[in-house]
Image: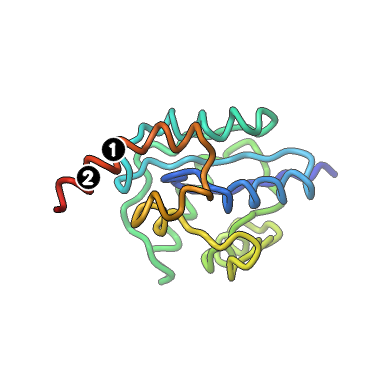
Amino acid sequence: MEKIGFTIGKFAPFHKGHEYLIETALKQTDKVYVIVNDAQEINTPIETRAKWIKDQYPQVEIIYGYHPPKQYGMDDKSVAIQIEYLKELTKGIHPTHFFSSEPYGAKVSEYMQVEDCRVDPQRKNVPISATMIRQDLEKNKKYINEEVYQEIKDQFQKKKGEQE
């Protein structure tokens, strides 16, 4: 049976932790889908964020998550809304594995009836998150590749100037 993995994220911005997650998925499955969701956190179009991934991993399939549900959480109602969204995005794909570093991975895997593959949840192998990068781009520059850095540095500098 073909092993089909998927992951989901905003990739706002795409960083070394995301790379580690995707590389783990590629090693453990025959095919990997990456769902890239719209993101309010960063002023970079979804197509650009998907391109960052596809440029580095041309073998993955990108699924665009335009207008994801706004309701998030681990409560049953929020989870049900998110799962319906994921089922719609993955319709016809039949994934077997879900890769995530987040606690919601267990819920997604359970509801989608796929194997739960948690990757570096304590962020010991790659100690970074997109939130940390958004909080201090220069301090965490080493966790993003040059293309991503060049794409976002002006918007981060502009944002920092507006806050001062």
**Residue 130: % across, % down:** 44, 53
Place of residue 42 in the rendered image (x, y in percent of width and height, measured from the top left): 33, 43
Residue at which label 1 appears: 155
Where is residue 50? Give x, y as percent.
50, 33
Looking at the image, residue 148 sits to the left or right of residue 157; the answer is right
Tell me the quadrant of the picture where the N terminus can be found.
top right
Residue 33 sits in quarter: top right
Q: Which residue is mark 2?
A: 159
Work out how far the residue at label 2 is from the one at label 1, CA to CA, in angstroms: 6 Å
Three-letter amino acid code of the residue under disc 1: Gln
Judged from this view, the residue extending furthest toward the front is: 139
Q: Residue at x 35, y 38 (%)?
A: 153
Which dot marks residue 96?
Answer: none
Look at label 2 and name its amino acid.
Lys
Regarding mark 1 in the picture, which secondary structure is present there?
A: helix
Question: Could you tell me if the residues under marks 2 and 1 are in contact, i.e. CB atoms within 8 Å?
Answer: yes
Q: Position of residue 162 (x, y in %)?
A: 15, 46
Q: How many marks?
A: 2
Which of 27 and 104 lies nearest the eye of the viewer? 27
Measured along the vertical axis of the image, is residue 71 above or below residue 156? below
